Amino acid sequence: MRVIIAGGGIGGLTAALALHARGYRVSVFEAVKEVRPLGVGINLLPHAVAELAKLDLLETLNRSGVQTKDLSYYNKFGQLIWREPRGLEAGYPYPQFSIHRGRLQMLLLKTVRARLGTQAVITGRQLLSWREVSGGGVEAVFRDRHTGTDHRETAALMVGADGIHSAIRAILYPEEGVPVWNGAVLWRATSIARPFLSGRSMIMAGHQDQKFVCYPIGSPAEEQGHALINWIAELRTDGRDLAEREDWNRPGRIEDFLPPFRSWRFDWLDVPELIRSAQAIYEYPMVDRDPLPRWTFGPVTLLGDAAHPMYPIGSNGASQAILDAACLARCLAEAGDTPSSALQAYEAERRPKTGQIVETNRRNGPDEVMQIVEDRAPDGFEDLDAVISRDELEAIAARYKQVAGFDLSSVR
């Protein structure tokens, strides 16, 4: 059985590997002419790492990323609100990884070409349309962006893994329009700097209108005692239109966001110094899309950001795309000669779960602890227990892990 995947990002490439491991013939068609390692840092949660480990990628991830040790939340004064161990430190059977998005995509691309063949991923092919074939299957039309020639490809199934601006989703839902913007803008970058806290810590500081996130995505050994630190500065703005299409490579200007962070010098991190040492800064609006009532139409379905783009809260975007890929491959293998029922089973399992995460992230997900403290103690605190109890903090953390599917008992 042949499967066409439209989109060569993290979700599409993972799906190609998972389907190939189950014995399917897979072709990936990517619209860009050349796949380049764009973006900055992302996190892979243990349940997603478990699926990549099944594809024999754990050793490669260990060489390419950083095993996250702990996650901490702080208020805008750098006072600790909540800290919890992560990955192996928390008793999970698999690590949590912090890794450069582009580096992960390129290692997946290299692995797909090594296992499936160099022609398994064809770049510069833009999806134009498709039709169902009598007797089952799909015929898709792709335009070669190098030559302008149209090519027809037939397969039993087609998977739309072509991101938040999915061509397949736009055809299925032509009235949907642009992504939904919540008024926040993210400035994302990497800096080479001294390690902070444990050296493998992920931190979040501030509140919903002003937030700073950072974590290492490279080891000190690679940078002669310093580490490659990924960071995100987030500000909410009410007087700005979302005029441009968001992408992974739009340059940002330091003067647009540094001033509100100039006083954020904590004992354990100098935020303005980290910002000023950035190698390059990228601007990205915080956008998502409303959950869909349906992903699957005959032999065509959606996966990853094409199906459920979500706010980058809770480290879930790439992880959920990887879980989609694993679920799709499993459902196809279990369905045997009835691929249409496999797509229905895949959607039945994944669509409600991811829709709940989208909605939860819109309410700040686990980051709500920072807003609670901001609301209750805007001038800081001397006694955290008088502001928020440990039971309340533990409940918020546990609730999100269950929603996102990486509570410890489930992953074990």
Image: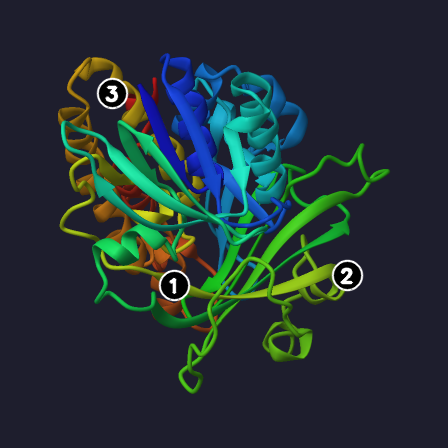
SS class, disc 2 = loop
The answer for how far apart the CA atoms under marks 2 and 3 are is 48 Å
Relative horizontal placement of residue 397, taking residue 108 as reference (left or right): left
Residue holding disc 2: 277
**Which residue is more in the foreground, 37 or 50?**
37
Residue holding disc 1: 287
Relative horizontal placement of residue 274, taking residue 70 as reference (left or right): right
Which comes before the other along the chain, label 2 or label 1?
A: 2
What numbered label is drawn on residue 234?
Answer: none
SS class, disc 1 = strand
Task: Give the farthest residue toward the bottom.
Answer: 239
Residue 403 location (% of width, % of height): 25, 40
Residue type marked 1: Val
* Image point (37%, 35%), residue name: 153
Which comes before the other along the chain, label 1 or label 3?
A: 1
Q: Is residue 29 above or below residue 361?
A: above
Label 2: how many residues lie within 10 Å, few (<14), some (14-19) or many (20+)?
few
Residue 377 location (% of width, % of height): 40, 68
The answer for how far apart the CA atoms under marks 1 and 3 are is 31 Å
- Asked whether the beta carbons under mark 2 and mark 1 sit within 8 Å of each other, the answer is no
**Which residue is more in the foreground, 370 or 326?**
326
Answer whether residue 398 is visible to the viewer in this image: no
Label 1: how many residues lie within 10 Å, few (<14), some (14-19) or many (20+)?
many
The answer for how far apart the CA atoms under marks 2 and 1 are is 27 Å
Residue type marked 3: Leu
Q: Is residue 191 above or below residue 208?
A: above
Residue 323 location (% of width, % of height): 35, 31
Residue holding disc 3: 332
